[in-house]
């Protein structure tokens, strides 16, 4: 391995950390608040920038800054990386144990730098501390079992860095750890190169994780109703077309139900739109208690809903509709009466437009017959 100048490698890490801090900081300003953890992720490389500046100034500043301060900022950046990842994934951060670890590490580094100077022991203490932080982050991610590329990338970087830290502990235990971080030897070059890679790849993984989350949120907004946890009309029609294509291969036809809340305008006019929104949410909750996992529910417009039932006959759709009526009678019986129109696919000459037209006609017959019932076509 070529022996590079440690100060050059540290400077490279500082430049890359600064760039990633700027990127994450800009993302925090422009991304929606629902994507949490970006602020802490931006703080991590920023702290690493300050750390590299102090490392590079070693010999020109007091050891309390060049050694203790630099390592403290490096450890603090790792803690912000851990905290940001947990917050991003919706988990709380247990600050007390980590603050305790940080205080003990800084205390030990101070003693081993100023009172009883011992380079090998000091490096060993710091290596164990930062390995605890990155090891905890790796275990947290592995337990979640996320298979996405950004998470896998971060896990791979953490595994690589932990292996380097384990190798560093081994060299320390065998007396091959050198006498100073800035020694120009293969071991220090390997360790600092791993540090450079980590300061680049972890923030890069953060950027990819946030971008992936933003894409998922935008896709959700594009396909789901803004008020209710169901598909919107456009996504429902796409789901229907997909199901019709699938049934042509399997020969198992789907059924379709259009549903409309009875006298919903009067509910809004009498009780207000907030009450009306609460009624809609209650309706969806009651419907979902009856539906199968494969059934697709959507808000078709206003107080109208649509339901796609894969591999379902007209008779089975009617049985399900009766169960839906029974479920809706619980909670707000005066607000949640619903008329329904059901139909099923009729063969190769049938189409989605024809099915929707038949279901709509059946729905209006149910309303004309007294509402709160199901008609078929």
Image (cartoon, helix red, strand yellow):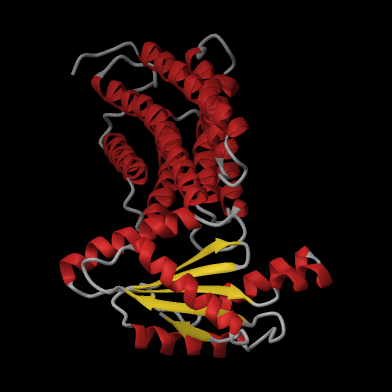
**Quarter where residue 215 is shown:** top left
Vertical position of residue 4 compared to residue 136: above or below: above
| Quadrant assignment for the C terminus | bottom left
The answer to whether residue 192 is left or right of residue 372 is left
Residue shown at the point (49%, 89%) measured from the top left: 323
On the image, the x and y values in percent for residue 281 come to 63, 70
On the image, the x and y values in percent for residue 345 come to 30, 73
Q: Would you say residue 67 is visible in this rendering? A: no
**Quarter where residue 115 is shown:** top right
| Quadrant assignment for the N terminus | top left
On the image, the x and y values in percent for residue 227 come to 62, 59
**Toward the viewer: 87 or 369?**
369
**Quarter where residue 145 is shown:** bottom left
The answer to whether residue 161 is left or right of residue 220 is left
| Residue farthest along the top direction in this orientation | 60
Q: Would you say residue 4 is visible in this rendering? A: yes
Q: How many marks?
A: 0
The answer to whether residue 258 is left or right of residue 193 is right
Vertical position of residue 5 compared to residue 129: above or below: above
On the image, the x and y values in percent for residue 140 come to 42, 55
**Toward the viewer: 216 or 79?**
216
| Residue farthest along the right direction in this orientation | 270
Residue shown at the point (60%, 43%) measured from the top left: 103
């Amino acid at each position: 391995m070529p022996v590079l100048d440690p100060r050059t490698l540290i400077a490279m890490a500082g430049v890359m950390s600064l760039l990633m801090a700027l990127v994450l900081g800009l993302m925090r300003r422009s991304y929606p608040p629902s994507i949490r953890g970006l602020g802490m992720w931006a703080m991590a490389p920023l702290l690493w920038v300050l750390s590299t500046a102090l490392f590079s100034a070693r010999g020109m500043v007091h050891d309390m800054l060049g050694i203790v301060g630099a390592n403290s900022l490096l450890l603090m950046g790792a803690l912000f990386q851990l905290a940001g990842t947990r917050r991003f994934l919706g988990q709380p951060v247990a600050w007390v144990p980590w603050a305790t670890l940080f205080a003990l590490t800084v205390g030990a580094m101070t003693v081993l730098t100023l009172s009883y100077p011992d380079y090998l022991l000091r490096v060993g203490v710091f290596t164990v501390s930062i390995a605890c932080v990155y090891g905890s982050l790796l275990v947290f991610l592995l337990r979640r079992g996320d298979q996405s590329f950004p998470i896998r990338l971060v896990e791979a970087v953490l595994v690589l860095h932990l292996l380097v830290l384990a190798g560093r502990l081994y060299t320390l235990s065998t007396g091959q750890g050198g006498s100073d971080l800035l020694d120009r030897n293969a071991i220090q070059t390997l360790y600092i190169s791993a540090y450079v890679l980590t300061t680049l790849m972890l923030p890069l993984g953060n950027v990819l994780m946030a971008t992936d989350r933003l894409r998922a949120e935008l896709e959700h907004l594009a396909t789901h109703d803004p008020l209710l946890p169901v598909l919107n009309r456009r996504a429902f029609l796409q789901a229907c077309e997909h199901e019709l294509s699938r049934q042509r291969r399997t020969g198992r036809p789907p059924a379709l139900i259009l549903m409309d809340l009875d006298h919903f305008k009067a509910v809004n006019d009498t009780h207000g739109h907030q009450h009306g929104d609460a009624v809609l949410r209650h309706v969806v909750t009651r419907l979902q208690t009856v539906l199968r996992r494969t059934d697709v529910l959507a808000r078709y417009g206003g107080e109208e809903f649509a339901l796609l039932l894969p591999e379902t006959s007209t008779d089975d759709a009617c049985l399900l509709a009766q169960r839906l009526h029974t479920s809706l009678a619980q909670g707000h019986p005066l607000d949640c009466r619903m008329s329904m129109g059901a139909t099923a696919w009729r063969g190769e000459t049938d189409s989605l437009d024809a099915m929707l037209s038949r279901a709509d006609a059946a729905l209006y017959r149910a309303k004309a017959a007294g509402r709160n019932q199901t008609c078929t076509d």
